Amino acid sequence: MQLGFAMLCAGSVRAKNAMNIMLTNVVDAVVGSLSFYLFGFAFAFGSDFTTNPFIGSTYFALNNVPNSSYDYSFFLFQWAFAIAVAGITSGSIAERTQFSAYLVFSFFLSGFVYPVVVHWLWSTHGWLSPSSTTGLLFGSGAIDFAGSGVVHLVGGVAGLWGSLVEGPRVGRFDAFGHPVPMRGHNATLVVLGTFLLWFGWFGFNPGSFEKILVAYPTTTDQGNWTGIGRAAVVTTLSGSTAGIVTLFGRRLLVGHWNTLDVCNGVLGGFVAITSGCAVVEPWAGVVCGFFAAWVLIGLNILALKLQYDDPLEAAQLHGGCGAWGLIFTGLFAKEEFVIQAYDSGKSGVVRSYGVLMGGGWGLFGAQVVELFAIVGWVSVTMGPLFYILHKLRLLRITVDEEVAGLDISSHGGYAYTQTEESNGRFYTDYVRMQNEQS
């Protein structure tokens, strides 16, 4: 997944910023590793005798792990989710952010903000968890099986605030407020990143079952292996439908077939289905992807009208499609699959399920509460952080540095020798320019 994000991000920015965006993806991984090890896992899954429904309080630095509940492999699996969140946010503020700011927000996001949401949904003590041992919200709990809200909405909302505080890139909108195209420099990397993420999603969505050899007692030939296969199929159908709808939708709007738009459409379908991949029929995956594509297209149009600049469309893609995924699950979750995913298919269990499947409003209400709770939590934590960094002049680079490119101004050279040979501003020219200004 992290390699996919790196390639997608690198191809989606201009060549003069390619080295910077690839380094930020590495930083997200290494900083996220330490912060999730020291604090994040404890805040997410830690518990004590008080069973705090808001935040965990044990297992700091993996103290007392492994135990009867968690082992090292579980930590590693959850770590992969944690670093993905920071990668999403990095895309929203690409091409104009100081490198030191990445270090600060990546540590805070993966070590505190994201783990708290994980505790709400994925811990057995969380107040939104469908596996809560202390009572289910609306008799249901919110279903976010692999993280449309926990991962993608968190990363998207964080990126939204970062981009809003920073403002658009230099030259992104003209004097009349009209958008000026700033296309990514390498479609090959974008396509490569998309397929790597597609493959990685098979680890995230089906992998969230965590155990394969769990037989369902009400059947003779089904178990978690059935749910894992179905989750993979549903994920594929949602992403594929979103991709084809985006292909034709953008063709009608802009008049040509756009490779980069289709790749983002595919990813939007994956993001949306991540919440309900284990609890819906394959045909519902097609429905999910269809509407996810239009959510993404619509939000991109709105972003341009509001002069909002997000180089990777991360807030629209991960935030918007993630929000739709939560609502979708509340509409289409099937009772049989919900019981299989959360009760190992036991007989006699009653669960709330999708409104359109006849399951009442309990689950749908919990999904809506999750959506607003995540938006609120991330806003009151990441919004002030970005604002403080902005006031301390630690967030955005100068105009000269942005025009020259982050590779030359912050990293000592370009990612490609061709760029360096064809660009008038070599590193020595940039240093001389800075000296003349001082």
Image (cartoon, helix red, strand yellow):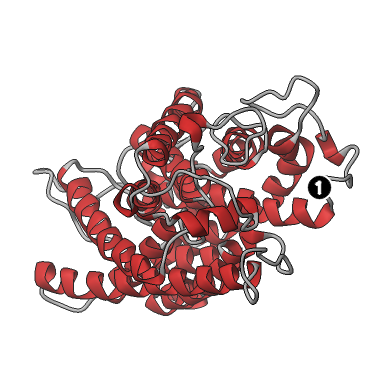
Where residue 379 appears, as percent x and y from the top left, is: 43, 29
Assign a secondary structure to mark 1: loop
Q: On the rendered structure, is 384 left or right of 101?
A: left
**Residue at left 73%, top 40%?**
41
Q: Amino acid at mark 1?
A: Tyr
- 10 vs 253, left or right, is right
Where residue 275 appears, x then y in whole percent? 47, 53
Which picture quadrant has residue 191? bottom left
Work out whether residue 37 can be spotted.
Answer: yes
The image shows residue 31 at horizontal and vertical percentages of: 69, 46
According to the picture, the residue beneath numbered tag 1 turns out to be 70
Q: In this view of the protein, which residue sits in the foreground, 28 or 355?
A: 355
**Residue drawn at 80 percent across, 30 percent down:** 58
Q: Who's the residue at 52% across and 48% down the image? A: 151
Image x and y of residue 415, in percent: 53, 69
Q: Is residue 380 left or right of residue 346?
A: left
Q: Residues within 10 Å of mark 1 (few under 14, many from 20)?
A: some
